[in-house]
Image (spheres, rainbow, N blue to C red):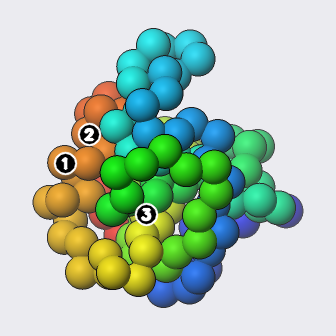
Amino acid sequence: MKTKAKQFLGKEVEVIIDRPLGSKHPKHGFIYEVNYGYVPNTKSPDGEELDAYYLGVDISLKKAIGICVAIIHRINDDDDKLIVVSNDNRDISNEEIDKLTNFQEQWFEHQIVR
């Protein structure tokens, strides 16, 4: 059964960081400018676990717990991304989310859902 990204909005989420800040994408070669991972025990429409950006921390992490404040909904790809932040960063703006995730999201038409 597929997990809906919207069910995580406003909730505490654990993220397993499998692509930490500064690591290189295994296929496309770009560098991750933020911590990126997945929510365990979920299944997104692409068949993988639900992906998540963990924003507001400038060190590499292996796992993190935070609040899902938004979703990047990819219009031309069936692979939404959670935006998870620590409690200190709950007021992050859509512009800041776009700026921080642009290194990967620049190739996808998307909108930020709150």
Marks 3 and 1, how far apart in space? 13 Å
Q: Residues within 10 Å of mark 2 (few under 14, many from 20)?
A: few
Say if 109 sits above or below 22 in the image: below
Dot 1 amino acid type: Lys
Secondary-structure class at tag 2: helix
| Residue 75 appears left or right of 46 | left
The label on residue 102 is 2
Say if 70 sits above or below 55 in the image: below
- In depth, the one of 85 and 97 nearer the eye is 85
Say if 29 sits above or below 51 in the image: above
Asked if the residue at tag 1 contacts the one at tag 2, i.e. Cβ–Cβ closer than 8 Å, the answer is yes
Dot 3 amino acid type: Ile
Percent position (x, y) of residue 102?
A: 26, 39
Q: Which quarter of the rendering shows the C terminus?
A: bottom left
Q: Which residue is mark 1?
A: 99
Residue depicted at x 46% and y 67%: 84
Picture quadrant of residue 95:
bottom left
The label on residue 62 is none
Say if 65 sits above or below 36 in the image: below
Q: Residue furthest front?
A: 59
Q: Which residue is mark 3?
A: 83
